[in-house]
Amino acid sequence: MCSYLNSINLIRYLLVWRVNSSLVYLPKYLSPEISAVLGTIITQRFPTGEARDWRKAMEVWNEYLSNTKQMGKKVPQASWPVDAAIFAYPGKRTYGQGELIFWELKLFGKSADHGLFLEVILPAMEEASYTSDTRWNRANRLWGRFDIDSVYVARGSRWEPLVTNGRLDLRRRVSPVQWAEGLNSEPVSEDKFSTATRLTWITPFDLEDTLEKGGKKKGKSPIKAPDLRHILEALIARLDLLIPGLSDDPGEALNAIEQADSVSILHKSLKVTPKGCPGRYIGTQIFSCIPFPVIPYLELASILHIGKQIHFGCGTFVLSTRTEAP
């Protein structure tokens, strides 16, 4: 993919939850609720001294959870005291008995610690599955109405089982660099993106300066879709947090950014995210032919997430060759 891979510490977990109630409704965007509920449970489980950082981080969530009128209307600017992204896979909002809910937890940098997952986060999930806490265990809500069906951990492009049928494999060894195994060696056809390419934001994104200046109509500014340079610069900013000092010497990435300048936006279909969702915009963009050296950086950006509110899974996308009219 690119030479930066082995310098990035990251552990990716795929969580599969099985609904054990006859009917469950999910919020418009699940990630903030996962963060709030698991974060609160983790804070409560820690001894007082060890919970200081978590308690401080959860102050915003406590206010949010205690105000039922605000829940689902405005997501606070909050995160855990560890570098984590909660990426709830897009899906429906109504689930019945036995149906599965998929989401991904990513631990970055110094927080890419398998022990943290086993000793802190997984037990909090287990408690959330049977909780009777009235702050979130309400009629037809997810909390207290699911089982942890299975958990997988990424090794390159493969998912290896960690929890199967509710049983944890304690023999599984997980490292913070296994996520990148084989990714650099996987062949990518040079003509795959030789035609117009569709970029679909599968979670909302919030990149700076994405509003057109001026041109207001009825109090609203038109949405300016980020170009490829903007997206790659957001990736460099993200990498600089994971690999300190990278922005001072981005090296090979500069060539990709320069080549991105030749790519134009052929079509955009972006909309403002609804209330209760993090991020600002979601939708699709269609670019002209993307130079082959740029593709690995876009693929890396989709894994790491870019922009603001990464903790809620914002700023990830998929690429596909455009085969139909916009």
Image: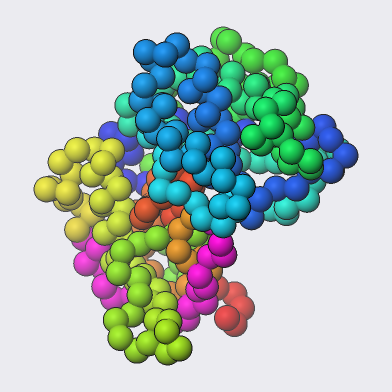
Decide which of 291, 72 is in the foreground and name it: 72
Decide which of 250, 18 is in the foreground and name it: 18
- Report the magenta residues as a range: 255-277
The residue sitting at 44% across, 71% down in the picture is 194
The residue sitting at 60% across, 52% down in the picture is 69
Using the rendered image of the protein, determine whether residue 299 is visible from the camera's viewpoint.
no
Here the colouring is rainbow
Q: Position of residue 275 (x, y in %)?
A: 56, 62
Is the residue 62 above or below the residue 25 in the image?
Answer: above
Left or right of residue 181: residue 137: right
Give the farthest residue toward the left. Answer: 248
Q: Position of residue 251 (x, y in %)?
A: 16, 50
The residue sitting at 56% across, 52% down in the picture is 70
Question: On the rendered image, what quadrant is the C terminus found in?
Answer: bottom right
Decide which of 63, 169 is in the foreground and name it: 63
Q: Position of residue 145 (x, y in %)?
A: 77, 32
Is the residue 129 above or below the residue 321 in the image?
Answer: above
Q: In which image quadrant can residue 53 be found? A: top left
Q: Position of residue 5 (x, y in %)?
A: 33, 39
Left or right of residue 305: residue 259: left
The residue sitting at 37% across, 53% down in the picture is 308
- Membership of 99 in magenta stretch: no
Left or right of residue 126: residue 279: left
Q: In which image quadrant can residue 138 be found? A: top right
Is the residue 218 above or below the residue 302 in the image?
Answer: below
